[in-house]
Amino acid sequence: MIALDRSEYLSLGTPDWSSGLAIPEQRTIYVDEKDPLLIRRVIPHEITHIILHNYLGFDHYTIHWINEGLSIYEEMRIWTGQDKVVITMENYKPLPIEDLILMKPYIFSSKDTIVVYYQQSASLVSFLINEYGMDRFRDFLKALKTRTLENALKEVYGIQSISELERRWKAYLKRATPTPIR
């Protein structure tokens, strides 16, 4: 559904900090028509949610960060015109990855936490894609259909634990240069 203005969009029960909302089970997207980034960011983001949910066949809490991270990665590819984007944590203090994994995207204590959650999720997905390639990320998503997050990380990337993922990601951040936004 395309809302004609912000008040109509919010009347749909959407979070006040959002510009779009996907309900994958219903294959429905709610967006604010007046959002200036509707075509370049909001719609690609929300469509990615629906596609990923339908591909995986479920929406388990341990992969919410992957769902948000991939959605942001895809919107950034369209926005920047780049095939590959690097998303870092410039200006953000990361959450412990164990905490990030357990968070549900619509239950936040503050707007600052929302911003960090989305940025960090996108940064982690960017790391996995840029360090290991899109084919391995696709294998990772496929592995998540039948394996736990930890087992999928081990099988596809050779990453033995969530703490090892965090260490590798932080090492990547030290040498990564973010893709500029135009």
Image: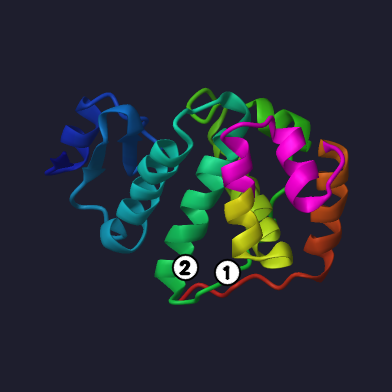
SS for dot 1 = loop
Asked whether, in this view, residue 119 is left or right of residue 163, the answer is left
* Frontmost residue, 26 versus 8: 26
Mark 1 vs mark 2, CA separation in Å: 6 Å
Asked whether, in this view, residue 18 is left or right of residue 97, the answer is left
- Tell me, yes or no, whether the highlighted magenta stretch contains residue 141: yes
Q: Above or below — where is 118 with respect to 105?
A: below
- Amino acid type at circle 2 is Arg
Q: State the image coordinates of residue 91 (x, y, percent, origin top left).
A: 69, 56
- Amino acid type at circle 1 is Val
SS for dot 2 = helix
Q: Are marks 1 and 2 in contact (CB under 8 Å)?
A: yes
Q: Above or below — where is 156 with respect to 65?
A: below
- Whichever of labels 1 and 2 marks the residue nearer the N terminus, that label is 2
Asked whether residue 113 appears in the rendered view, the answer is no
Q: Which residue is mark 2?
A: 77
Q: State the image coordinates of residue 35 (x, y, percent, origin top left).
A: 26, 53
Q: Tell me the magenta residue range.
A: 140-161
